[in-house]
Amino acid sequence: MVKVYTIASGKGGTGKTTVTANLGPMLAQYGKKTCILDADVGMANLGLILGLENLPVTLHEVLAGKARVRDAIYDGPFGVKVVPCGLSLQGFQQSNPDRLKDIMTDLVSEFDILILDAPAGISRDGVIPLTIADGVILVVNPEISSIVDSLKTKILTETVGGHIEGAIINRVAATGNDFNSAQMEKLLGVRVLGIIPEDPNIRRASAGRSPIVVKYPTSSASRAFKRLSADVAGIEYAEEETQGTSEGFVDRLARALFRARA
Ligand SMILES: Nc1ncnc2c1ncn2[C@@H]1O[C@H](COP(=O)(O)OP(=O)(O)OP(=O)(O)O)[C@@H](O)[C@H]1O
């Protein structure tokens, strides 16, 4: 049974595309047939982060009724399938967001998980992804404006009959913070699904047209994305030995030297 998630926020720039670009590949890595779609048809940049640009057919052409969705599906990292949007304003103007629901119907039989990267705000093209998802995941930054705007999106989702799956708290200070997950759950009135730390490697990876889980797999945000993805996939997460790789090597070397001397 397919599960459709919409990654949403109230405020812009909280990290929706970053979450989509990392959660999708990791779910595919964990054995789930996953497709990620850039439903931010006006300000699309999922394709940019994944190095999928200048494509002949994108979601724009599909939403304009000029192409079939299967012609807009491209290969992404770890076997995830990607339906990117074009970057042109003209493509956006020709798109009819109402067609999104039909597109999802075409995809449900082929995938275990579909993830929609929704636009910020409460425009019409932003509301449709909230209504067609089985679960809306809010991406919230630990700051008052983001929390307040997320609450508005939560109310809007519930008003249009959607369901909130939970929230991902993104850009949490890696050190010296007083972040309290239980307090955040109380404030938002939703479950906290994952906490992603502030990590400069996210921007570095994007500049290299890659998700952080691919480019810097042991970076702090990558480990958090892996944990979150394992939870969503319903599998046990085994923490990778980050320092362990080098510690293990040192241990092995020490043992070998000890044996050699003995
Ligand atoms: N955990 C993080 N640590 C550091 N930088 C981050 C983190 N998450 C996101 N960013 C950066 O924040 C910026 C905004 O992220 P992103 O584009 O994913 O947000 P968005 O919610 O999709 O934006 P929009 O609302 O404009 O679509 C990007 O430059 C991204 O690299």
Image (cartoon, helix red, strand yellow):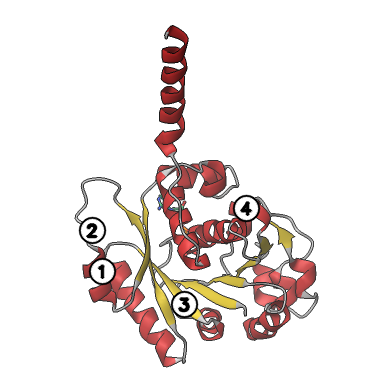
Name the N-terminal-most of marks 1 and 4.
4
Asked if the residues shown at circle 1 and circle 2 are in contact, with their CB atoms under 8 angstroms apart, the answer is yes
Question: Mark 2 or mark 4, which is nearer to you?
Answer: 2
Q: Amino acid at mark 2?
A: Phe
Residue 206 visible in the snapshot: no
Q: Amino acid at mark 4?
A: Leu
Residue that numbered label 2 is attached to: 179
Tell me where residue 78 appears, x and y as whole percent.
64, 53
Asked whether, in this view, residue 8 is left or right of residue 73, the answer is left
Nearer to me, 196 or 45: 196
Answer yes or no: disc 4 within 8 Å of ligand 1.
Answer: no
Q: Amino acid at mark 3?
A: Val
Residue that numbered label 4 is attached to: 50
Residue 184's tag is 1
Tell me where residue 112 appears, x and y as whole percent.
63, 72
Q: Residue furthest front?
A: 262
What SS does tag 4 mark? loop
**For the point 41% across and 14% down, which residue is it?**
258
Q: Amino acid at mark 1?
A: Met
How many C-alpha atoms fall within 10 Å of the one at disc 1: few (<14), some, or many (≥20)?
some
State the separation of the CA atoms marked 1 and 2. Answer: 8 Å
How many C-alpha atoms fall within 10 Å of the one at disc 4: few (<14), some, or many (≥20)?
many
Decide: is 152 above or below 48.
Answer: below
Name the N-terminal-most of marks 2 and 3.
3
State the separation of the CA atoms marked 3 and 4. Answer: 23 Å
